[in-house]
Amino acid sequence: MKVLGVIPRGYCKGVIRAINIAKKSATHHKPISILGMIVHNQYIVNALEELGIHTIDGHGKTRLELLDEIQEGQVIITAHGASQEVFDKAKEKGLEVIDASCLDVIKTHDLIKDKLKTGYEILYIGKKGHPEAEGAISIDKNKIHLICQKEDIDQVDKNKKYIITNQTTMSLYDVYDLCEYAKQVLNHVEIEKETCTATQIRQEAIKNIDPAVDIVFIVGDPHSNNTQKLAAIAKSSHDFEVHMIESIEELNTEWLKGKTYAAVSSGASTPTYLTNQIIHYLQQFDENDQSTYPKPHIEKDKILNNG
Ligand code: SF4
């Protein structure tokens, strides 16, 4: 089968940094916990667990609440960042804090703090319950408003001065629509788009994919916001058949029948190994040759390679 490996795809600099920080910490012989999933990928979480790095995760719990479950040792703050309250509480508990926040997330926090000081309120386009949005909004819960849809913009006082910014992994196209709407209905709004470069160039590559492709695979964890956005952009921009899969185990060979040209991309938190495994499998796949159907096993010790 002909296969297009979409470029760029996969690990971004923030994820590589966070994984490397975690791997390095594993040599310190102290209890190590990660506050939430280091990146939204269960394979990486499991591989780190094998190295003795325990992930504290609880659906619906904030980073601040999750800290109650760590009593000693080191705590790693994930690439999504965290609020100052989290850093303060960890220090009060005597925990050693290792900060793996992505520098692009910190940049957005700095922008928000600067604008608050100069009298603006913030409209933050993000995903409800996402740790990155939680960290940003906790900078000032009274003056930062989470915007998930146009109706949220309708709820704010139209006469205040606003900066509109966003979670780094949001869809460029959704952010554009919400910014345009805010400009129409609010009296004073300035735009500071913060979709990170890694997210932006991966989304643009999907939007501009070769139209001759007849099936698209987006590899990534279903909890990964940037993976979901890539799949949504692929579906909305073309007539391709699009499948979001976590690994080769979820690839159904029935989907490949009658297809000749596949494209593969992956979220910024997807292990390179898992994506490459799918690309290699598709390249050798021949619908008329049963010997090409069996799928390879996932070798767990390769998950953190290239990380
Ligand atoms: S997607 Fe962007 S903001 Fe998020 S970790 Fe990667 S580089 Fe950083």
Image (cartoon, rainbow, N blue to C red):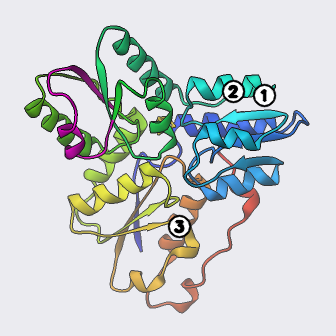
Which residue was labeled with disc 2? 89
| Structural crowding at the residue carrying mark 2, measured as other residues with C-alpha within 10 Å and reported as few (<14), some (14–19) or many (≥20) | some
Q: Tags 2 and 1 in contact by the CB under 8 Å rule? A: yes
Q: Is residue 221 shown in magenta?
A: no
- Residue 93 is marked as 1
- Residue 108 is marked as none
Q: Is residue 143 above or below residue 21?
A: above
Quadrant housing residue 21: top right
70 and 299: which is toward the camera:
70
Secondary structure under badge 1? loop
Quadrant housing residue 238: bottom left
At horizontal 57% and vertical 42% (from top left) the residue drawn is 62
- Give, as a single range, the part of the protein colored magenta: 146-165
**Which one is in front in this view, the residue at disc 1 or the one at disc 3?**
1
Q: Is residue 239 above or below residue 7?
A: below
The quarter in which the N terminus is drawn is bottom left
